[in-house]
Image (cartoon, rainbow, N blue to C red):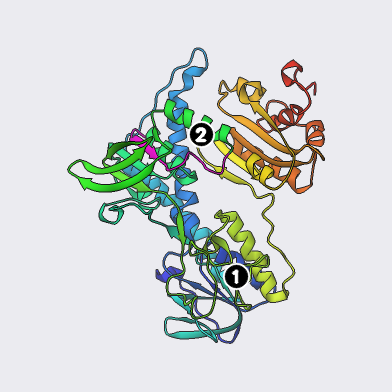
Amino acid sequence: MADCCKVKAKDGAFDLVVIGAGSAGFSAAITAAGEGARVALIGYGMIGGTCVNVGCVPSKTMIRMAEALYGARTAERFSGITGEAHITDWQQVIAAKDDLVSTLRQKKYIDLLPEYDAISYFDGAARLTEGGVMVAGQEIHAGKIIIATGSAPALPDIDGIGDVPYLTSTSALELDHLPRSLMILGAGYIGCELAQMFARSGVNVSLITRSHLLPGAEPEISAGLAGYFEQEGIELYSGLSYENIRRDDNGVSLVISRAGAREIISADQVIVTTGRTANVENLGLGDMGIDQRANGGIIVDDYLRTSRGNIYAAGDVTGRDQFVYMAAYGAKLAALNALKGDRLTYDNRAMPWVVFSDPQVAGAGLNEAEAREAGFEVMTSILPLDQLPRALAARDTRGLIKLVADRNSDRLLGAQIMAPEGADAIQTAVLALKNNMTATELGATIFPYLTTVEGLKLAAQSFGKDVTKLSCCAG
């Protein structure tokens, strides 16, 4: 770790040890310090963790770059306008991304440490002991410990994958030149975001998945996004099995089986986005009797406790809800429970999630299949974006809004939005779910006209009426 990141360890015992110096670790440490606790924060490698260094921040600025290209190229959707844009210097694009990352890492992590006298920072690989945590040959003693070590890209079970020069979501954003072609394995949110970003940057992209795009999304949204991707030239392969992958003279070749037929897909390079694995190697979980999931994630209860009562875990290392804001939320609860008694429970029932594709895909609550599986008598409403005034004014009607409700009580159970501005609209659905609103109540709520979020009102009204027969704002 660079000298600028080192903080002198304060003398004395600690009330809490936090392992991991990413978003979850900092959230736990700052929360504990705010409660008057003495905290030992242990980092290993680049301070700041996944989000600011190799995840959210670099990927979203690159996605915005590609959206700027697309916006100029599609300006002709407005009568009397034409536009064009292209990349003139890829290395300059990467340098600007790196500058943003280093700036935020400095301001939101490194510069914060001296502001908290109660937090001592230690650098090194940590291992749990009966008395606390061992790091850099020193044992740190504390009654309570929080593990927040995050996750890393995982390799899929494909014959030969370890013998090809594969890229991950991290290394793909560090390429010093654009390849002519890419194949992307996995069509979850990371795969979809990278596929569209690279395609808009001029790369020939093949997006490959065993099942279908965005497995957690409603089928109407998954199918719709697949269609938009194909319109942009992304070649989709779904409903298949992998046979093997090999390096060849032209790059990489993947052999798949689909509908009983064998196919070969070739590209200059391959990006693996098929999942993530918890960073738990060498922590000594087995020696401490800490239970893990099949994917390596640490099992925790509703209070974020592991199977070892004084040890808690939060964030991606638990193998669930792998979003930075859920990591920070869980870590805050873990710190408060560790210090003040186990009284706060982790609640993800109205957790929002966003895929920064274009159109964006966002959701909260149960989808239709989950609601039926939970035993609800389900009713659904789908509003195509060509019924949304905002989309008509923007000359961009790609997308839809789907609501799920309980037919017996009219209570909202879930919402998903596919729209160019869907990410900012989903929080209204979160609040509706959190406050147990009914579809009727949401449909009667006043919304500002010519906004994307107004679509939630129209979708709610669609449960009981034909919104195509309403004048503007008449509902």
User: Which residue shows up at 52% across the image and 80% down it?
Assistant: 288
Where is residue 469? Give x, y as percent: 75, 16
Q: Which residue is at the far front?
A: 260
Where is residue 372? Give x, y as percent: 68, 42
Quadrant where the C terminus lies? top right
Tell me which label, 2 or 1, sits earlier in the chain: 1
Magenta part, dominant SS = loop
Looking at the image, is mark 2 or mark 1 nearer the viewer?
2
247 vs 307, left or right, is: left
Label 1 sits on residue: 29
394 vs 286, left or right, is: right
Q: How many labels does the image show?
A: 2
Label 2 sits on residue: 358
Q: Which residue is at the far top?
A: 80
Where is residue 322? Give x, y as percent: 54, 55
Name the one closer to the observer, 149 or 300.
300
Where is residue 225? Give x, y as percent: 51, 32
Say what amino acid the circle numbered 2 marks. Answer: Asp
* Element type at mark 1: helix
Say what amino acid the circle numbered 1 marks. Answer: Ala
* Relative to 411, residue 161 above or below: below
Name the one closer to the observer, 343 or 256.
256
User: Which residue shows up at 46% across the image and 23% down it?
Assistant: 74
- Bounds of the magenta span? 201-217
Q: Which image quadrant for residue 368? A: top right
Q: How many residues crowd around disc 2 within 10 Å: few (fewer than 14), some, or many (20 or more)?
A: many
Quadrant where the N terminus lies? bottom left
Is residue 305 visible from the viewing direction of this image?
A: yes
Name the one closer to the observer, 377 or 418.
377
